Image (cartoon, coloured by chain):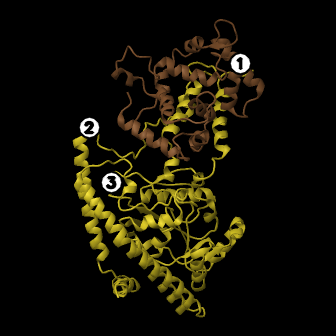
Amino acid sequence: RLGAAWLVLVFALIVLPSALGVSLGISEGYMWLLVKTLEWATIRIEKGAKKSRPQMLKIPAVNGIIERDETPMEKEIARLRQADFEFSDIFYFCRKGFEAIVDDEVTQRFSSEELVSWNLLTRTNVNFHYISLRLTVVWGIGVIVRYCFLLPLRFTLAAIGITSMIVGTTLVGQLPNSSVKNYLSELVHLTCSRILVRALSGTIYYHNKENKPQKGGICVANHTSPIDAIILTNDGCYAMVGQVHGGLMGVIQRATVKACPHVWFERSEIKDRHLVTKRLREHVADKSKLPILIFPEGTCINNTSVMMFKKGSFEIGGTIYPVAIKYDPQFGDAFWNSSKYNIVSYLLRIMTSWAIVCNVWYMPPMVREEGEDAVQFANRVRSAIARQGGLTELPWDGGLKRAKVKDSFREEQQKNYSKMLVRNGSIG
Amino acid sequence: SVSHSQITRLYSRFTSLDKGENGTLSREDFQRIPELAINPLGDRIINAFFPEGEDQVNFRGFMRTLAHFRPIEDNEKSKDHNGPEPLNSRSNKLHFAFRLYDLDKDDKISRDELLQVLRMMVGVNISDEQLGSIADRTIQEADQDGDSAISFAEFVKVLEKVDVEQKMSIRFLH
């Protein structure tokens, strides 16, 4: 009977409002309490830190931990005389190498962002120590709240959300194609997304809604986590693009595609770039179809920077609607470090965080300009997204999470150095 | 000497590079750093961390090698004149650079050793003949005792006007 009461409560307070698109203010209340608690905790930690080590206040390593000298190679290896090679030439490469060993731009993007102050989750207290009994008690209460109350609640919601999605889209899929079907499909997708967002205690702030992606367009966003898609579908309907998976994900994919023309590729098809581009182009050409959602980085990055956009998405044509997503790491780390955690442990971590708070900025549409190739266009869109979201831009490929860097980069450095040797003085 | 916060940061860096989580770094761990992998002298730099014949370096060794790059002004603060010369003295920084050239550790940079380093830095962009004449000229200008090789003393002499301290130092932001 307790279980039944529980379900009724969940249904009334969360599922029903999700379907109707209203909010009862429960999450707002929770967030307010959370913010107050974390502020209190921060003050206590700072007081504690000041007492034990008065001169050391933790400063965020936003710009890296060492001074980086960005003078270009040519100036650095300036010549004292007109000789070609000097023994001191190696100093430049040597120092660059050591700088990279101490702190490099790339590998840090594949692990979670460091927090300025502790947010009462053990997983983020790498650099924080025991401060006081009161703080530890609060942390303990936090653990109980998160694991014994929030986790079961969120799990229930997620189960309801996913089941409704599968059942709902299968039912809608039985209807013949019509505007009624489209309307119902959108309703089902939106409702289930809203339920799932509440399953994560998600608080999302959408900005510039007038720029929301239109039908026949392509929505591109930076990628931090698998839940990025849910964050966006909470506010609108998109045609998803992706590879067919097995298991539960596959079931969801097969069900949803009956109701709405999502673009799922078989594993073999995805390797064929022409096929992929062709199918997407056909979808985009049909102005009655929902905008497609693509994450051009190709992999999850830790939300402090935007890495190289794969040009494939920008060769399809059509209008690009860039979207910037920035998570607030204080309430929960949304980044999926796929080399460290599998999807199940990732979801478990998400569901035992305080909340997922993020900002979503819809940006004005962009089209490829005259004389601009796909790569330049991709970089232009990427810059816009990085600027809006307050993220840094890196020219590196997100694939470096797993793969080795291409030799061509090294060859470029060698070429530049050779030019210096040959330019000065005469050879031979 | 190195501050507590710097050690903590470097240890945090060490552990993040240590993918095998066994307290030591292998050459592969270093090569995973893209900026280092594309450095023409990357392999030589990585080698500097590994003692003779070993394939793993622990945190102590890691710090020891990095210590060469501490700014020299750090030494002014610890006026320990009775101790051994600090690793980041001008002389030791030069010695570190010398060892990058002197692969067989015979305290001389031979023509071959110089050519090897040159080849690493220029890749395929300069012919053997051109590179050879560059090497010959460099050795000729620096060689004082006529043995067609560069000893450490000759190396130091050639670089006496170079601001080694500035070029071979890394400064922490805090």
Task: Say what secondary structure mark 2 lies in.
Answer: loop
Q: The residue under label 2 is which amino acid type?
A: Gln
Give the residue displayed 48% in from the left and 21% down from the top.
B163
Q: How crowded is mark 1: few (under 14 residues within 10 Å), some or many (20 or more)?
A: some
Residue A36 placement, left or right of B109? left
Chain A's colour is: yellow
Q: Do the residues labelled 2 and 3 touch (CB within 8 Å)?
A: no
Chain containing mark 2:
A
Instruction: Name the quadrant containing residue B36.
Output: top right
Of residues A313 and A19, the one nearer the viewer is A19
Chain containing mark 3:
A
Q: The residue under label 3 is which amino acid type?
A: Trp
Numbered circle sitting on residue A55 = 2
Give the residue displayed 66% in from the left and 35% down from the top.
A414
Give the residue at mark 3: A118
* Quadrant of the drawing holding the N terminus of chain A: bottom left
* Quadrant of the drawing holding the C terminus of chain A: top right
In this view, A297 is above or below B153: below
Task: Say what secondary structure mark 3 lies in.
Answer: loop
Chain containing mark 1:
B
Which chain is displayed in brown in the rendered image? B
Give the residue at mark 1: B111
Q: The residue under label 1 is which amino acid type?
A: Arg
Same chain letter for marks 3 and 1: no
Percent across and percent down for residue A170 are: 57, 88
Residue B62 placement, left or right of A356? right
Give the residue displayed 42% in from the left and 60% down from the top.
A333
Give the residue displayed 25% in from the left and 67% down from the top.
A33
